[in-house]
Image: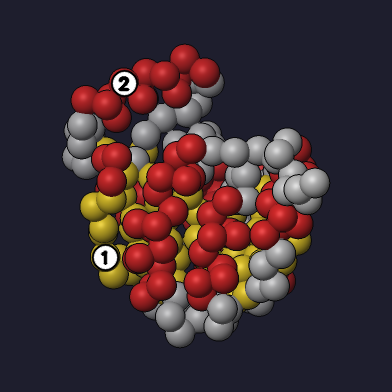
Amino acid sequence: MSDIDSNKPFSQACENNRQPIYEVLKDTFANKKTILEIGSGTGQHAVYMAPRMNHLQWQTSDLSENVEGINRWINDEKVVNVLRPLEIDIEKHWPNTDLLKNFDGLYTANTCHIMPWETVRKFFVGLKGMEEGSRLAIYGPFKYQGQFTSESNERFEHWLKAQEAHRGIRDFEAIAEEANKSGFELLKDHNMPANNQLLIWQKR
């Protein structure tokens, strides 16, 4: 009888995009030791990325309702350098300078268009607590100069707002402004499959 937990959460999007994201992150975090993932979701990215970057520790985190699912993926994959999820709600637990000083890299995927814009801004304010040289990787869809990069992203925007009015694909320029205010400079804007971007920043 299999020990695999068939009831753990599953995201097909995570399955589809994990390898292209890894190809960028393996260089981005090549010299880093401790990565904090904000919004680990199902946990699929963590258990895929971390064993392929076994020089570092990967700390998962998410809202309390997602912690059990992340733990199920960790249990199944038995990845030694993935840490059990922290319960982090940006609205309640941020900024947390004492936490962030323990990490020299931060990764987050598909969170900026889910959080309210004021929460996104709060997230960036908290990143002032990261040390010089820290790397920040943000994955997801973005608009440029107010324009969608594809018709599918425009449809996605309508779907997001139908779910929750505060959601929406963010303007790259607005994200860049918040990142710059927190001391980060853009190193690379990677075009990714399915009309997404992977933005890589470094703390000045």
Residue found 50% across the figure and 26% down from its top:
166
Crowding near the residue tagged with mark 2, few <14, some 14–19, many ≥20 C-alpha atoms within 10 Å? few
Q: Amino acid at mark 1?
A: Lys
**Which numbered circle lies on residue 188?**
1
Direction from residue 202 to residue 73 in the image, left or right: right
Mark 1 residue element: strand
Q: Whole-percent x and y of residue 137?
A: 42, 61
CB under 8 Å between discs 1 and 2:
no
Residue 62 in view in this figure = yes
The image quadrant that residue 100 belongs to is bottom right
Amino acid at pointer 2 = Arg
Q: Is residue 90 visible?
A: no
Q: Nearer the viewer, residue 140 or 11?
A: 11
The quarter in which the C terminus is drawn is bottom left
Residue at mark 2: 155
**Disc 1 versus disc 2: distance between alpha carbons?**
26 Å
Q: Is residue 12 above or below residue 103?
A: above
The one of 55 and 32 positioned closer to us in this rendering? 55
Mark 1 or mark 2: which comes first in sequence?
A: 2
- Name the residue rendered at 26%, 65% in the picture: 188
Which structural element holds mark 2? helix
